[in-house]
Amino acid sequence: MLTCYDATFARVSEASGVDALLVGDSLGMVLQGHDSTLPVSQADMVYHVACVARGCQRPLIIADMPFGTYQESPELAFRNAAQLMAAGAQMVKIEGGREMATTTAFLTARGIPVCGHIGLTPQSVFQLGGYRVQGRADGDRERLLTDAMTLEEAGASLLVLEAMPAKVADFITEHLRIPTIGIGASAGCSGQVLVLHDMLDIAPGKKPRFVKNFMAGKNSVGAAITAYVEEVRAGTFPGPEQLYPE
Ligand code: KIV
Ligand code: NA
């Protein structure tokens, strides 16, 4: 899985073998220049989902539900998720653990597949006290596992695990039937996701530890994405340099 925000990158990613495209609310930072994902609107997401959907046929298109469009109630979540589905998404992603179980069950029972997202959940950056690795404190491993199992039980189809030690991600992956998608988690997850602009090393500056520059030594975007797909399938990405120590 890679993030994707427009039709051209959707086409290139599809041709390079990517299975799933996440229209992430990371677009707030990557495309819009904000310093968090909080300002991203429902209209922004609908627009970018439609752009991506026009650019590809085969990859699964997952749309992030932006901050404020799903936390309040399952009904509000359904109304907004339905717009993302109408724009071309085939699944929506919502951040949060057990507190999102009721909403996950509400959406999945009404025809909308749901991807969960636990660990570092960027929409909660101010509650978390910054963008930092999760799952290290006493009891965190069990708390994250309970969140994961509760979301699976509620009907989630996929689960993103962000920024946690590999042992925690492996523990969760082993206990679930649904696939896990890691970012800064473990090569033992069922799949991986990265922010496209990060793995193409487009902008200068410091990147999170889990990012790898796949453009290095490649002469096209397609070749870089193909290298990423091959490393994920081979289980060689992420390597030790990209993982968080316990
Ligand atoms: O918005 C995003 O890009 C994401 C992934 C990095 C998981 O949520
Ligand atoms: Na996101």
Image (cartoon, helix red, strand yellow):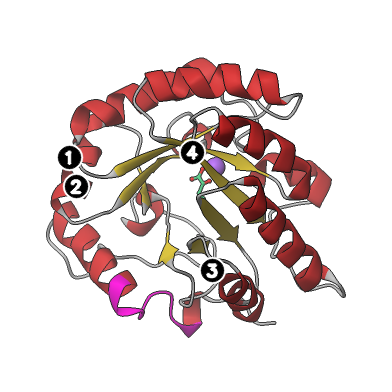
Residue at point 34% right, 65% down? 213
Q: CA distance from mark 4 to mark 3?
A: 31 Å
Q: CA distance from mark 2 to mark 1?
A: 5 Å
Q: CA distance from mark 2 to mark 4?
A: 21 Å
Residue 236 within the magenta-colored segment of the rendering: yes
Outermost residue, front side: 109
Marks 2,4: beta carbons within 8 A = no
Q: Earlier in the sequence, mark 4 or mark 1?
A: 1
Between label 4 and label 3, give the one nearer the viewer: 4
Q: Secondary structure at mark 4?
A: loop
Give the residue at mark 3. 209
Q: Is mark 2 within 8 Å of ligand 1?
A: no
146 sits left or right of 95 in the view: right
Q: Secondary structure at mark 3?
A: loop
Q: CA distance from mark 2 to mark 3?
A: 26 Å
Magenta range is 233-240
Q: Which residue type does callout 1 highlight? A: Arg
Q: Which residue type does callout 2 highlight? A: Glu
Give the residue at mark 4. 113
Q: Is mark 1 within 8 Å of ligand 1?
A: no
Which SS does the magenta portion mostly show?
loop
Give the residue at mark 2. 14
